[in-house]
Image: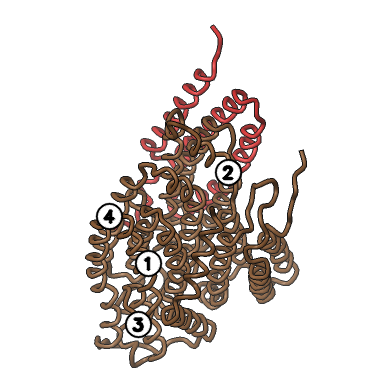
Amino acid sequence: MIISLNHYLVLSAFLFCIGVAGVLTRKNAIIIFASIELMLNAVNLSFIAFARHWGDAGGQIFVFFSLVVAAAEVAVGLAIIVVLFRHKETINIDDVNLMRW
Amino acid sequence: MNITYNLPAIGTQLVLGAGVILVLLADLLTGKKNRDVAYQTTLTVLVLAGIICVMKWGSAGAGFGGQVFGDGFASFFNLAFLAIAFLVVFNSPNYLKRNEIDHGEYYMLILIAVLGMTFMSSAGDLLIFFLGLETMSISLYVLAGFHKSRARSNESSLKYLLLGAFFTGFLLYGIALIYGQVGSTNLADITSYLAGSANPLGGYMGVGLALLLVGLLFKMAVVPFHFWSPDVYDGAPTPVTAFMSAAPKAAAFAAALRIFYDPAISLGLPWDKTLWIAAALTITLGNFAALAQSSIKRMLAYSSITHAGYLMIGLAAGNELGASGMLYYLFTYGFMNVGAFTIAWLVNRRGEGNYLLSDFAQLGSRNPVMALLMSIFMLSLTGIPPLAGFFGKLYVFSAGVKAGLIWLVVIAVLNSVVSVFYYLRVMVIMYMREEEGLKDLEKAPTVAITAILCGLVILLLGLFPGPLLDLARESVLSLL
């Protein structure tokens, strides 16, 4: 069997959906964060597959930048979660409920 | 391949980028006890960037092989971002000292956020747009949680971060699919693909554009992606809220115009139906939720959702009047919001996290100038002539009528009537309500100057809307 562009795209879409499901169903802030990372990396897979398909380096360069952005988001995100833990001694997002309209 | 760098095209951004480093260094070397040097450096950098922006107005052209544009459109928005940031930074030290969060990083983060926004408004490539958006967002996540000893501030930043990163995933997926269809992330290539294709939304393109739009609607806080904004605005430190409710929203609309404006008029893509429904829902929901609020901060947060809805009419109209009306609207809206939030934190007397409308009681006799300015901001947000808020709405609504969106405009006008109730309520409280135990306002010259400047700008742009509208129209023409 030849692995074609579509195989990569289906895998990428599948991983992305797992990430979305994780964000929507889990309650632990760090697991949610990991799920978001999974979504971003699933997209990176699409980018690389398309870059190969077009024979264009643009998509691969995009992946470098999106990796950097994801890393920056993690750095900031974990710091915010640490502060959350200091306030509440928990990182369950159901307990983050001071403001509800 | 030869790439012309054309550095003047990113002159504003270069000054801001150098400024970020300078502010960090200045604060490191001097900021043991006070932050005056960091504060003054930041103001200087913002003014310098503004001067460069005005000097190079619309003449810089494309840079880095069409990756960034220094055209009139970019200059217009950059000037708006810089003005909003200047006003917010100008009155921040007072607030920061009052709440004991007087750290130099605050100024640096604001500069980085502005840097990201300037890249969003001048992006010629989805990569640059994405990087600008994330530069802005990540520094805003930190700014929202800047008051780290307060649980509400932390909660605000956590909500913003988790939802923002979640929607970044969708936005990035959208860009990937567009890249997959076109083979390039350059906006010019995408536009010519859409114009030259028999079935422009076929393949991955339709889904890609839709996901990209979802990411942008989230940043604009448009229904159904608005749910984060009241909580985030409420919990964030108030000057940050003022900044967040004005500048990033303008940046998201600037990016939306850059990406969608040209294809939308030349092709008549089916955006208008989606945007129609989103705009109608946004206006109505924001309005009725604002009615029920007892906190001025949350009321203004819902009001900013409503205003995003009015702006959506200009986007849905997709004509030149709509786009230039949006530019005028966004520019003036920033001043109204910064003014209103600034007075709100000065008047607040129960401490952060407890902003009540009743804090404004008797302001008319306690401090007539502030009460008058607050009235100007409220009337302008309502859209009463001859203030700037009226003309913004007028241009956007008439663009909607011109594009045949009659019912949408009718809904918007009816909602404007409803909004009179909650904006005028603030004035009624200021002039009519008696309350015990009120103190005089703290003396804060920077706050007074900020509010007076905002009030003057709104009055002048309302009395003489012509020049700014002409400038907006020229800026929109530079997009094509």
Q: Amino acid at mark 3?
A: Ser
Is the residue at mark 2 from the same chain as the one at mark 4?
yes
Report the mark closest to the observer, 1 or 3.
1
Query: Where does label 3 land, which residue?
Result: B375
- Disc 2/disc 3 C-alpha distance (Å): 45 Å
Q: Amino acid at mark 2?
A: Ala
Residue A15 visible to an observer of this rendering: yes
x and y percentages locating residue B372 in the rendered image: 37, 87
Q: Chain of mark 2?
A: B
The residue that appears at 58% across and 63% down in the rendered structure is: B78
| Dot placed on the residue nearer the N-terminal end, 3 or 4 | 4
Q: Are marks 4 and 1 in contact (CB under 8 Å)?
A: no
- Between residue B472 and residue B349, name the one nearer to us: B472
The residue that appears at 68% across and 57% down in the rendered structure is: B9
Q: Chain of mark 3?
A: B
Q: Chain of mark 4?
A: B
Mark sitting on residue B188: 2
Quadrant of the rendered image containing residue B464: bottom left
The chain whose colour is red is A
Report the mark closest to the observer, 2 or 3.
2
Q: Are marks 2 and 4 in contact (CB under 8 Å)?
A: no
x and y percentages locating residue B424 in the rendered image: 27, 78
| Dot placed on the residue nearer the N-terminal end, 2 or 3 | 2
x and y percentages locating residue B267 in the rendered image: 42, 43
| Dot placed on the residue nearer the N-terminal end, 1 or 2 | 2
Q: Chain of mark 1?
A: B
Query: Where does label 4 land, which residue?
Result: B280
- Disc 1/disc 2 C-alpha distance (Å): 28 Å
Q: Amino acid at mark 4?
A: Ala
Query: Where does label 1 land, which residue?
Result: B395
The residue that appears at 49% across and 43% down in the rendered structure is: B168
Q: Are marks 1 and 3 in contact (CB under 8 Å)?
A: no
